[in-house]
Image (cartoon, rainbow, N blue to C red):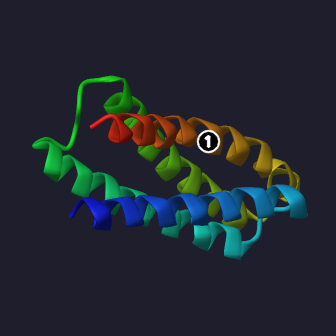
Amino acid sequence: MLIVAMNFIFVACILYSIGVWSEKLQGKLKVWHLIVFWLGLCFDTIGTGAMGIMAGSIIQYNFHGITGLTAILLMLFHSVWASIVLYKKDETKIRQFHKFSFVVWIIWLIPMVTGMIYGSRM
């Protein structure tokens, strides 16, 4: 189960990174970025849930657990906000959305990296 969970989180990292960096490089939020954000969130949530089941609790009250929960909630907010921005077709927000995406991605990397460090010590 650990390998499956790690693979889901790895795929989430690839998807989310592709979405965020391509949006930044293209300078405009597009529908395919939104799809990749949602897929990244789904994969991360599944992987994190599997890790939580193995740990005996979905929420861990330590640095990694709190930052992980924060990251998933931010990813959810990010995906919902991106959906709203595209739905409203506000060109200014569509062109500036990458700034928010990049901040969320950086915050998301914190539990990703701490998870790798914590996991390698076990």
Provide the secondary structure element on which disc 1 rests.
helix
Q: Residues within 10 Å of mark 1 (few under 14, many from 20)?
A: some
| Residue in front for this viewpoint, 55 or 90 | 55
| Residue with the most extreme front position | 121
**Residue 81 appears at what percent x and percent y?**
60, 52
Q: Quadrant of residue 65?
A: top left
Q: How many marks?
A: 1
Q: Is residue 115 above or below residue 26?
A: above
| Residue in front for this viewpoint, 106 or 37 | 106
- 34 left or right of 62? right
Q: Is residue 89 above or below residue 54?
A: below
Residue depicted at x 51% and y 49%:
75
Residue depicted at x 20% and y 44%:
58
On the question of residue 110 being in view, the answer is: yes
The residue wearing badge 1 is 104
Type of amino acid under label 1 = Val
**Residue 13 appears at what percent x and percent y?**
55, 58
